[in-house]
Amino acid sequence: MPTANSVKGAQSRLAAAGMTVLVTEKQASLDDLVDAERGYRPYLALNAADQALARAITLATLRHRRRLQAMLAKCWDRPPPKRATHLHAVLETALAQIAFMKVPDQAAVNIAVSLVGENPATARFRSFANAVLRKAVSQIEALSQETENVSLFPAWLSKQLQRDHGKEKVRAMARQFAFEPTLDISSKPGPGETLPETINLPGESRRLVSTVPVPEQPGYAQGGWWVQDIAAAQPVRLLNHCMEGGIAGKAIADLCAAPGGKTMQLAGLNARVTAVDISARRLVRLEENLKRTALAADVVCADVLEWNPEQVFDGIILDAPCSATGTIRRHPDILWNFTEENISGLVSLQTAMIHKAASLLRPGGILVYANCSLLKAEGENLVAATDIAGLETVRLSANALPGLEFCINGRGDFRSLLHHLDLGNPECSGMDGFFCACFRKSPSI
């Protein structure tokens, strides 16, 4: 009988199960696990195609895990021990393939059963795994219907989002979250750039249509564009809108800049950009992006709170560290490695960073505070409670961002949610959750 090691695709499944355990039990970041230099060794040992499969399985499992667990619970009389994390992960990743990835049932089941049987810690559960998965296959339609209302969000997040945005919006976000997100791009201004097939979005953003890997898409290697969700493109649009005469020729600081999407936007609009980030490793990617796009910026590796440049700036974008709950469509691991207890520390850091950014502005300069959080504690509530001498709030009008008027809230800030930007088909709709508030430094300071 062939072993799991000899079956095509088995090592991808094994890596997916391993990464699922590390995310859910050790709060690992999936980005770190798939990092080409420092990632999870069983994943790095795979070829490119198998790595793509392992990552896809892991993402599907983490996205739908609460529903997968509810399905599996209907397929056994007694659950296996919680400490059998490898067994749970193999069952969850196998069912994710069957229920959400359209992988042939037999392949998913047979490989999963082999992986359980060949691991000494779980070998005694081989027959159990076989019975559970075959029952799931035979009842998959009923299981899907019976679990369709299971929340994919942790209880604390659902509760907080309902407080912040209301039940209907949370339901709409959950529906959109269940779909894999598309990729958006920003491009260098002006004619002549080669672009892939896209759907035009408000502003200068476009949504990729093709599923061809990004580096193989037309114009990418030539530096004509970069991946950037439409929501993440708005801080630069807002800064350009709020600054008299726009940002061309102005001294602009991009704080917490890596991997560089906003830096490239700013440079493309002919601003004099200083990009600052605390992570030397992430700045390597930013500099690679600048080189590929032939755009220029001064790059500084520094802790923003300790950075004391000689100059002051005409405009600043502060994309502050946050819970990143607005990016859970792309990073569902956040649902498993971020907890409610982390929020207060982030809010304190964000508040300190706003004060620091204000000190780096010239009188009359514009600050855009931004983050990719869905939580009002890191956005609306924070800016309402933050009193900084010399900073005046700039209330955005509905026409500040043509095509995204629905994202300007009653306070005059920008707020996007996961279900926004409905293009008529949920498979190509949605956007990241994002918050932006704009401030002007008093000319008399």
Image (cartoon, rainbow, N blue to C red):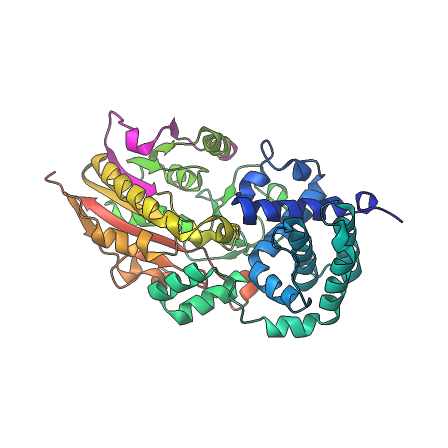
Report the residue at 18% width, 44% height from top.
Answer: 388
Residue 195 seen from this side: no
Q: Position of residue 248 (x, y in %)?
A: 31, 39
Report the residue at 66% width, 49% height from top.
Answer: 86
Q: Position of residue 20 (x, y in %)?
A: 61, 49
Q: Position of residue 284 (x, y in %)?
A: 49, 29
The answer to which of 191 and 393 lies nearer the viewer is 393
Q: Which residues, given as a range, are shown in magenta?
A: 291-319
The answer to which of 57 and 335 lies nearer the viewer is 335
Report the residue at 72% width, 49% height from top.
Answer: 122
Residue 368 falls within the magenta-colored stretch:
no
Look at the picture and state if 42 lies above or below 425: above
Residue 304 falls within the magenta-colored stretch:
yes
The answer to which of 195 and 235 lies nearer the viewer is 235
Residue farthest toward the right in the current orientation of the protein: 1
Q: Position of residue 253 (x, y in %)?
A: 32, 35
